[in-house]
Amino acid sequence: MADNIEAIQKSVKKYIAIGALLIFFSGLTVALSYIELPTHGLNILVGMILATIKAALVALIFMHLNHERSTIYKILAFTAVFAIVLFVLFVLSHDDPLTFSGFYSPVDR
């Protein structure tokens, strides 16, 4: 913790600035939801990028992860890579749906 009033005021100013930035990004997210980009996937991509920026700001500043040891960054990097792999698997499975030859639904009979 800070020992003097100047350090406390400096950290409060930083928190207010980050809070204002988060409000700005939230407003930007809402504004972009009304804009139709060329594809629906691009809308989702822009929304996910903004959400990632907001989550990183909250984690680094308000949860004080910017002062942690390098081990926490390795765990966070693994989590990010795992999430990206899951997104890629989802996209690949969406592009190549499962089909079964010889399968008939009860409605088709």
Image (cartoon, rainbow, N blue to C red):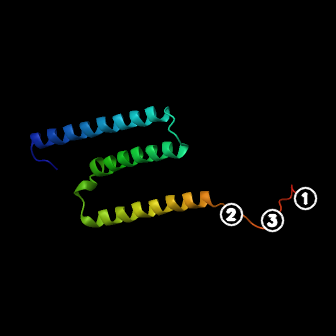
Query: Closest to the observer: 27 or 37?
Result: 37
- The local secondary structure at tag 1 comes to loop
Mark 1 burial class by Cα count in 10 Å: few <14, some 14-19, many 20+: few
Give the x, y percent position of residue 68.
24, 60
Sequence-wise first label, 3 or 2: 2
- The local secondary structure at tag 2 comes to loop
Where is residue 8, by image quadrant?
Answer: top left
Badge 2 amino acid: Leu
Sequence-wise first label, 2 or 1: 2
Give the x, y percent position of residue 11.
18, 42
Mark 2 burial class by Cα count in 10 Å: few <14, some 14-19, many 20+: few
Disc 3 to disc 1, how far (Cα)?
11 Å
Query: On the image, numbered disc 2 is attached to which residue?
Result: 98
- The local secondary structure at tag 3 comes to loop
Furthest toward the right, the residue is 109
Mark 3 burial class by Cα count in 10 Å: few <14, some 14-19, many 20+: few
Q: Is residue 57 above or below residue 98?
A: above
Query: On the image, numbered disc 3 is attached to which residue?
Result: 103
